[in-house]
Image: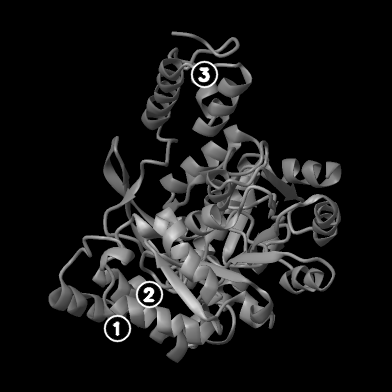
């Protein structure tokens, strides 16, 4: 087997398998100029199998009882599941377990069956989909709402259709893969990253684009970022529209349902909804279902209906999923105490972690990142957490920047105070065991 540099993952190197994730292996392959798919697949499978045997490959793990704040967690090579609190899902409000949501889903299946069988333009929609559209139009104050089978394809499909050959597309450095894939699929020839959450850098890029762009300028941000848990300065971004002519696309995947009056999101909370041209989100997080949407002016919806392949050529999400969305939206609006409890638990967990000494950087949302730049420590700490009843997954390159690995702890309203305390206490023990605070101090000093 071909080696990468001086290392071959098909050979047993006990220490080396802790130094790489499949992402860093992909990076090594790319930098080594290796493009042969046989070599790539052999090397990646060799690393995966070795990490599975060591118990440190968590990406094949699964819940025995479905998504919740806790469940027995198993892997393909682990015959005995571990009872764990779960910190890797985005079901912030726990509505996948809410009695009303479950009741509405069961009723929808009995009335309407399972799948839709075709796309929206071929008659795949039903009355539940139309109710969701009408609800969101009213909630968000937009002329039109288009539903997509997933949040990923909502971003990807809309942006692939929106961005044209002569446009300049400006995106945040931490933009989600669905945004990047949408731009790659579009005819746009020039897309430019600006520093994460830097309005100053965005303004510099807008100055250049305003001089050079022959088409439209499209700016894309996320209201809350999934890997770092921080929040976009939306009001400052919107203020730039007074000076520069651009379309603004905001992905509210991690804020819709948990921020703003009635869960309307951060655009609503910041009072900028009217100035945002496109508001997109998913139904897989706060609303505990599947699917996604883009809210916009009617003229864009008329265009997307025929130009967004992800809309025209994908089957609609099922009646059960639509019923779950409608029920979840009603619960969010009528039971605001659920979101308040979520934010209280988020604040409690953050305060405890910070008292111990963890640097959470600029994160604010229920996504709480623990930064572990050393891949070996990242994998070992994840494994130690799992052995002690706490489950999450390592996040490393290419999901985040090289040497900026982390474990995300995503707070769910169904997490108990005891689960939070156990997780925080365990993290403190493991940080001391693996010298994490020393490394963190050096990183801050060098930053």
Which label number is shown at residue 41? none
Screen quadrant of the N terminus: top left
Point 69% across, 44% down: residue:
190
Residue 157 vertical position relative to residue 17 in the rendered view, above or below: below
**How many numbered markers are drawn?**
3
Residue 46 vertical position relative to residue 335 in the rendered view, above or below: above
Q: Closer to the camera, 347 or 229?
A: 229
State the separation of the CA atoms marked 1 and 2: 9 Å
Q: Is residue 158 left or right of residue 167?
A: left
Could you tell me residue 440's position as x and y percent? 74, 45
Point 37% across, 58% down: residue:
312
Q: Mark 3 points at which residue?
A: 35
Q: Is mark 1 on a helix, strand or loop?
A: helix
State the separation of the CA atoms marked 2 and 3: 44 Å
Q: Mark 2 points at which residue?
A: 95
Could you tell me residue 373's position as x and y percent? 66, 39
Q: Closer to the camera, 235 or 60?
A: 235
Q: Residue furthest front?
A: 214
Q: Is residue 403 left or right of residue 153?
A: right
Q: Mark 1 points at which residue?
A: 100
How are the colours assigned in the image?
one colour
Q: Is residue 411 left or right of residue 368?
A: left
Which circle's residue, 3 or 1, is located before the other in the chain? 3
Could you tell me residue 221's position as x and y percent? 66, 61
């Amino acid at each position: 087997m071909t080696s990468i540099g001086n290392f071959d993952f098909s050979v047993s190197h006990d220490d080396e398998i802790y130094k790489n994730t499949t992402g860093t292996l992909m990076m090594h392959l790319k930098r080594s100029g290796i493009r042969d798919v046989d070599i790539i697949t052999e090397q990646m499978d060799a690393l995966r199998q070795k990490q599975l045997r060591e118990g440190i490959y968590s990406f094949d793990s699964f819940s025995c009882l479905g998504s919740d704040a806790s469940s027995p967690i198993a892997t393909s090579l682990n015959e005995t599941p571990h009872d764990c609190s779960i910190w890797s899902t985005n079901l912030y409000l726990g509505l996948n377990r809410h009695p009303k949501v479950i009741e509405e889903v069961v009723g929808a299946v009995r009335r309407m069956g399972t799948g839709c069988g075709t796309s929206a333009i071929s008659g795949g929609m039903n009355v539940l989909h139309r109710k969701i559209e009408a609800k969101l139009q009213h909630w968000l104050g937009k002329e039109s709402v288009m539903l997509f089978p997933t949040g990923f394809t909502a971003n990807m499909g809309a942006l692939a259709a929106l961005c044209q050959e002569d446009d300049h597309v400006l995106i945040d450095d931490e933009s989600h893969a669905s945004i990047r894939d949408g731009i790659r699929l579009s005819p746009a020839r020039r897309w430019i990253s600006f520093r994460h959450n830097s309005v100053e850098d965005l303004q510099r890029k807008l100055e250049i684009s305003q001089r050079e762009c022959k088409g439209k300028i499209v700016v894309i941000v996320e209201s809350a970022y999934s890997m770092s848990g921080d929040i976009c300065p939306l009001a400052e971004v919107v203020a730039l529209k007074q000076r520069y002519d651009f379309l603004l696309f905001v992905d509210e995947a991690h804020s819709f349902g948990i921020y703003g009056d009635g869960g309307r999101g951060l655009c609503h909370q910041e009072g900028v909804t009217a100035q945002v041209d496109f508001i997109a989100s998913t139904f897989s997080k706060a609303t505990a279902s599947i699917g996604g949407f883009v809210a916009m002016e009617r003229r864009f919806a008329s265009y997307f209906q025929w130009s967004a392949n992800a809309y025209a050529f994908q089957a609609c999400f099922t009646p059960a999923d639509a019923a779950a969305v409608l029920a979840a939206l009603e619960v969010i609006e009528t039971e605001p105490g659920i979101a308040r409890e979520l934010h209280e638990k988020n604040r409690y967990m953050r305060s405890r972690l910070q008292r111990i000494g963890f640097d959470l950087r600029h994160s604010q949302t229920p996504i709480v990142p623990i930064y572990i730049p050393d891949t070996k420590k990242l994998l070992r700490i994840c494994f130690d957490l799992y052995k002690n009843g706490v489950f999450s997954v390592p996040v490393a390159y290419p999901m985040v920047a090289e040497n900026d690995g982390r474990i995300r702890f995503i707070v769910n309203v169904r997490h108990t105070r005891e689960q939070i305390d156990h997780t925080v206490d365990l993290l403190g023990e493991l940080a001391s065991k693996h010298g994490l605070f020393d490394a963190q101090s050096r990183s801050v000093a060098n930053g």
